[in-house]
Image: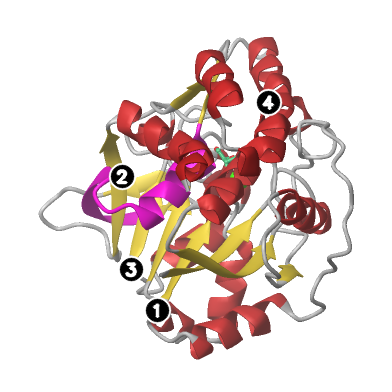
Amino acid sequence: RIKILLDVDTGVDDSLALLYALNKEDVEIVGITTVCGNVEARLAAENTLKILDLAGAPDIPVVCGFEKPLEGEWDGRTAFIHGDNGLGNVELPSGSRTLLEEDVCDFQIRLAQKYEHELVLVTLGPLTNIARTLAKAPSFAKKIKRCVMMGGTVYMRGNVSPMCEANFASDPAACDRVFQSGMEILAVGLDVTEKVRFTTGAMDWLDKCCSPHSRKAVDYMKQALTYYWEGNRNQNYCIGDCPLHDPLAMMAAVVPDLVRVEKRKARIECGGTYCRGMVVTDLREQPIPAEYVGFALDVDPKRALREFLSVFWKSQDS
Ligand code: BDR
Ligand code: CA
């Protein structure tokens, strides 16, 4: 089984990634930490507990992380896409689960120690928690097996500024620290996530064909995505479909060969007016000093969407 330590800023697409992982055979989420991004870390943690309940998941420890990036202030909620509550304004019941009151860095270090060289760290929000953990214990980088992160863009346009993607732009200093930590990294960014679209048609199909076990999750997805689709429509961004950003990163962590990867020496621009948070790769013969990072540069969108949907209907057979 693939053991995952998840770091997340639970908004709509994060919740989809979580539901996918919880329904995917051979995946075990051993711990979840939350960070400010789409919403405050605290709200992300509460949302995470609600999604775990919705999925009928086993007890998974959830720890609340940092409410501010390494430098500067948090930008605030992205309500026009994720709703005021981060879950597309869908009101899910608060179950009986509670947060684990442990320091987020200590928690991550403890799990990396317990499952040494086994853990896949999946990050779906800004990299603040991970940078802080590395500052406390630099050996964390080599104790985990690898890190798969949703973030960045190499060839595509940005989504929060001309060249930058939201997760990297929210905490560029943290991202650069993680990049230079010596960790084995796969960055799954807009180059591929923009290609994998969850359409209204796919949603209708899933609504008809989902397994009884997934019914609640699918009902939630339908409502949350309606908000997401509308949010994007208001931005003239994408109408009737949404990019599966976080789910694709999660899928890339568990399905080998889902994305085509190229390793590049890379840094993150931490200053500037228009490019703060931009991925800088250097293909020259004498590149800038930097560690290698793997970037997902291509994907078969149909295969990826099928993979996502499959976990919600396949269980029908069993
Ligand atoms: C990323 O930003 C957030 O809004 C999404 O949850 C995703 O992690 C996409 O740029
Ligand atoms: Ca996210």
Q: Which residue is mark 3?
A: 184
Which portion, as a residue range, is magenta? 244-267
Q: Which residue is mark 4?
A: 222
Q: Mark 1 or mark 4, which is nearer to you?
A: 4
Ligand 1 under 8 Å from disc 4 Cβ: no
Q: Mark 2 or mark 1, which is nearer to you?
A: 1
Secondary structure type for disc 1: loop
Question: Which mark, residue 296?
Answer: 2
Q: Which residue is mark 1?
A: 118
Left/right of residue 179 with respect to residue 37 in the rendered view:
left
CA separation, marks 3 and 1? 13 Å
Q: Mark 3 or mark 4, which is nearer to you?
A: 4
Residue 299 occupies quadrant: top left
Which residue occupies the foreground of this view, 118 or 289? 118
Q: Amino acid at mark 2?
A: Ala
Tell me if I can see residue 202 in this picture. Answer: yes
219 to 270, vertically: above or below: above
User: Furthest residue to the front?
Assistant: 318
Secondary structure type for disc 2: strand
Tell me if I can see residue 275 in this picture. Answer: no
Ligand 2 under 8 Å from disc 1 Cβ: no
Check if residue 248 falls in the magenta segment: yes
CA separation, marks 1 and 4? 35 Å
Q: Amino acid at mark 1?
A: Glu
Which residue occupies the foreground of this view, 199 or 37? 199
Q: Are marks 2 and 1 in contact (CB under 8 Å)?
A: no
80 to 153, vertically: above or below: above
Q: Residues within 10 Å of mark 1 (few under 14, many from 20)?
A: some
Q: Mark 3 or mark 1, which is nearer to you?
A: 1
State the colouring used for the structure image. Answer: secondary structure
Ligand 1 under 8 Å from disc 3 Cβ: no
